[in-house]
Amino acid sequence: MGPANRAALYLYQISPIKLACHSVTKFRPCIDLHNGRVKQIVGGSLRDVGDGPVENFVAQQPSQWYAAKYRRDGLGGGHIIKLGPGNDAAARSALSAYPGGMQIGGGITAENAAEWIDAGASHVIVTSWLFDKVGKLIESRLSGLVRAVGRQRIVLDLSCRRVDSPADQASEPAWRVAMNRWQTQTEIEIVPAQLDRLAAFCDEFLIHAADVEGLCQGIDASLVDRLGDWASQSPAAIPMTYAGGVTTMADIDQIATASGGAVDVTVGSALDLFGGRGIRYDDLLRRNGK
């Protein structure tokens, strides 16, 4: 079956769990996989060489335990992220425990995207493959991904890092999308014009604030303000999930206020489910009306 026919077929398959644009910030669950295990990692510590990442949490339970829990609790729209090689088996186990209920990211290309949809993912999440080695967007790859699985099955991961400004210049903060485990900044800046442009190719955005990810020291409030303005005001707005530094329920309230409820949130290291002390999983369920 060719890519175009396969993408059309997905339109008629069982619909994935989908959260449309709304006015209440929701909690989206996550499963981060590293070396085949569920972990919480300090985002900026991922490297291709040298010392391993800084680990905040390593689960005793397998990936499918978390996926099954999210399914029982009625939490949709979550994501599974494969942080490097050696995670495919754990990812497939999680997807089989919650078919159509979670998105998958990490090493996704137009060649393997359909395979992951067939394995039970609601969407594929993609970043690094869309760029060349110096961070320039390869638009033909983005179009090819749409042909492979359809726009409605794609989440663009626009996780980003702050751009350093000269010390002698007072300027507005800026962020660029980061690829290669957030080590390399790309040409894509997080600005309304770019978000409008990229929204035409996907169903949702996922944005980690990589500089604060896993630190449990609070969100990147300036980035949240920028995302919230776009999500609540742009005619091109699509569902968006923010992650990074969410430490207390007050952080979630801040995201909700800044976005008018249009930006959802993922909680990692601060969540008691992952050994954290800042936010209770049951409180998030209640926030979601569960």
Image: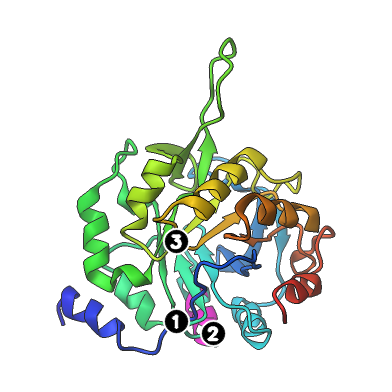
153 shown above or below 15: above
Q: How many marks?
A: 3
Q: Is residue 78 or residue 68 the one in the foreground? A: 78
**Secondary structure state at the residue bearing disc 1:** loop
Q: Main secondary structure of the magenta part?
A: helix
Q: Nearer the viewer, residue 204 or 64?
A: 204
Q: Does label 1 or label 2 sit earlier along the sequence?
A: 1
| Residue 90 shown left or right of residue 128 in the figure | right
The residue that appears at 44% across and 57% down in the rendered structure is 237
Is disc 3 placed on a helix, strand or loop?
A: loop
Is 92 within the magenta? yes
Residue at 53 percent across and 54 percent down: it is 232
| Mark 3 or mark 2: whose residue is earlier in sequence | 2
Pointer 2 residue:
98
The kind of residue on which mark 3 rests is: Ile
Residue matched to label 3: 238
Left-right relation of 184 to 40: left
Query: Is residue 265 visible from the viewing direction of this image?
Result: yes
Give the distance between the C-alpha atoms of the residues marked 1 and 2, in whole angstroms. 11 Å
Q: Amino acid at mark 1?
A: Pro
Amino acid type at mark 2: Tyr
Relative height, residue 257 to residue 18 (above, below): above
The quarter of the picture where residue 125 lies is bottom left
Q: Which is more foreground, mark 3 or mark 1?
A: 3
Q: What range is drawn magenta here? A: 91-96
Measured as percent of width and height from the top left, residue 175 is found at: 50, 36
